[in-house]
Amino acid sequence: MGETLEVFLAFLRFGVLSFGGGMANLPEMARVIIGNGWVTRQEFADGFALGQFVPGPNMLAVLFYGLSAAGLGGALAAALGMFLPGAVGAMWLVWGWQWMARAQWSRAVRKALVPISMGLSASMVLVLVQLSVDSLFWGLGVLVGCFLIYRGVGVAAVIAGGGLLGLLLGLG
Amino acid sequence: MKVPLGKLFWAFLQVGLVAFGGGGTAQLYQAIVLKRGWMEEREFLETTALCRILPGPVFANTAAHLGMRLGGVPGGLLALLGVLTPGALLMLLLSFAYFRFGAVPGSVAESALNGVAAAAIGLILATMLRQAPLALDSLKALGLALGVFATYGLLHWPLLLVLLLFVPVGMALYWQEARLPMPETEAEGRG
């Protein structure tokens, strides 16, 4: 029970802080939960990869991390902690939105969050590369994937292609 | 507009089943505005723009917000449950399989996941490249982005500290521009 609560509180903190897109907190999440011994570096990267296969937010990967930390209860605790803060805020917005839409501070925050999100995304790319790209081959893979998606190739096709390529490489 | 809770849950559950690849917000738009006419287009766009200010995935937040409007607090919770449940169940299944059959280092599964991760990182990079011209359109924007990257990405400062530092600075830098009522022209955020 104590462990589940610990997982919930950790992910609640990530959930409250994940401004600028759901995954902006990924670098800190990696540092904290790897540091806690809840997942290994490899498992963190694998959980992130598995999150690409499911519909809905990629951050559903927190179920993987919670499961690894404290079983099924941990998985649910991690998901609740991650998704509830934003959802509660969004529901509160039903009353507050007209005032929020006009308020100058809210416009200023939204404008500021655009470049801040870029910095957070760049940090996220850095930590993901450090955790899961362990060869020059996959470094090139990242660049090729980026190029293809930038040129308009379907995201699902590129991700499936990456998986298939890895599969072939593992068999060979 | 009020919608019966059963219908509401079913609508959001359907979105949750098909919202692959970060396109969830567009799917919500299809389901709620275009297909069912439960909300005006303008209202929907204003809602998603405001949901960007909140922590967490814009997609899940927007769903909770729309559900609350259409069916009160139970509607909001059911909408959130609807969009998350299919993905959550599949994620649990995959995770169980992973820990049960173990992706040992050097195994085929491990190698496949490495490929998926590489492609997914490519996706994040491509999204950033697309957004960069709009998002980094001024010196102050560039400065904010670099500052966040240097402190958070390179120096490993805690996220709370980084946000407490850069959000107020950013607000101050954009305060003048935020005064004028302006149309929503922000760059698309990831869902």
Image (cartoon, coloured by chain):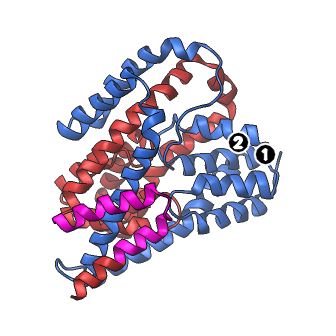
Q: What is the spatial separation of the Cα atoms under label 2 and label 1, in whole angstroms?
A: 7 Å
Residue B70 horizontal side relative to residue A43, left or right: right
Quick check: do tags 2 and 1 share a chain?
Answer: yes
Residue A170 position (above or below residue A14): below
Chain B colour in the picture: blue
- Tell me which amino acid carries mark 1: Met
Q: Which residue is mark 2?
A: B44
Image spot of residue B57 (x, y percent): 49, 48
Q: Is B55 a magenta residue?
A: no
Q: Residue at x 76, y 42 (%)?
A: B41
What segment is highlighted magenta in the picture?
A: A134-163
- Looking at marks 2 and 1 on the same chain, the residue that comes earlier in the sequence is marked by 1
Q: Which residue is mark 1?
A: B39
- Is residue A110 among what the camera can see? yes
Residue A13 position (above or below residue B174): below
- Tell me which amino acid carries mark 2: Phe
Q: Which mark is residue A90?
A: none
Local SS, label 1 = loop
Q: Is A135 a magenta residue?
A: yes
Instruction: Provide the major secondary structure of the magenta segment.
Output: helix
Q: Residue at x 21, y 49 (%)?
A: A31
In the orientation shown, which residue stands out farthest toward the front? A151
Chain A colour in the picture: red
Q: How many marks can you see?
A: 2
Residue A18 position (above or below residue A170): above
Image spot of residue B180 (x, y percent): 62, 14
For the residues labelled 2 and 1, say whether their Cβ atoms are less than 8 Å apart.
yes
Chain for mark 1?
Answer: B
